[in-house]
Image: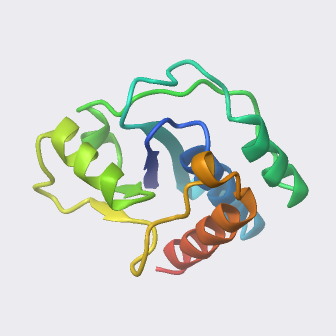
Amino acid sequence: MKRILFICHGNICRSPMAEMIMKKLVADRGLTAEYVIESCATSAEELGNDVYPPARRELSRHGIPCPRRAARRLKAEDYARFDRLICMESYNLRNALRLLGGDPEHKLSLLLDDRDVADPWYSDDFETAYRDIEEGCGRLLDL
């Protein structure tokens, strides 16, 4: 069983998009039973909130289901529960390291090696965020 946790700032845009995109990619390959895929935030700002409507619309535009969910914050016990903790940007990575007290097993990484995932919260560019996330999830699945 492979356990992946996607992490962003508020858990209403990028990390739930990554969760849903990865679940779809895994399902398309018939591997759903082999994966546990979730997402969370490094901040408490959006706790309990559902996926941001423009993020939901972008997923829908690509035929990716997005069930209702509630944003949650990264917890220390997540480190033991997941094999990979994947951050959307370097700021999230620094906050995750602080919340977890380090990364002794080297489970934390960025989704993209060469850049941060574009943040649609400020740009309102959910299409670019989607492309970045789809690219990163595709690479992750091929590992």
Q: In this view, does 97 lie to the left or right of 48?
A: left
Q: Among all residues in the image, which is located at the extreme front?
A: 123
Residue at (69, 63) in percent of width and height:
130
Can residue 31 be seen here? The reply is: no
Residue at (19, 63) in percent of width and height:
106
Residue at (23, 51) in percent of width and height:
94
Residue at (43, 75) in percent of width and height:
115
Q: Is residue 33 left or right of residue 30?
A: left
Q: Position of residue 120 (x, y in %)?
A: 63, 53
Taking depth in this image into account, of 101 and 14 the one nearest to the observer is: 14
Q: Position of residue 92 (x, y in %)?
A: 34, 50
Can residue 102 be seen here? The reply is: yes
Q: Where is residue 140 in the image (x, y as percent from the top left)?
A: 50, 73
Taking depth in this image into account, of 67 and 36 the one nearest to the observer is: 67
Q: Is residue 36 left or right of residue 102?
A: right
How are the residues colored? rainbow
Q: Among all residues in the image, which is located at the extreme top?
A: 48
Taking depth in this image into account, of 105 and 45 the one nearest to the observer is: 45
Query: Quadrant of residue 16 in the image?
Result: top right
| Image mark count | 0
Q: In this view, does 97 lie to the left or right of 130?
A: left
Q: Where is residue 118 in the image (x, y as percent from the top left)?
A: 55, 63
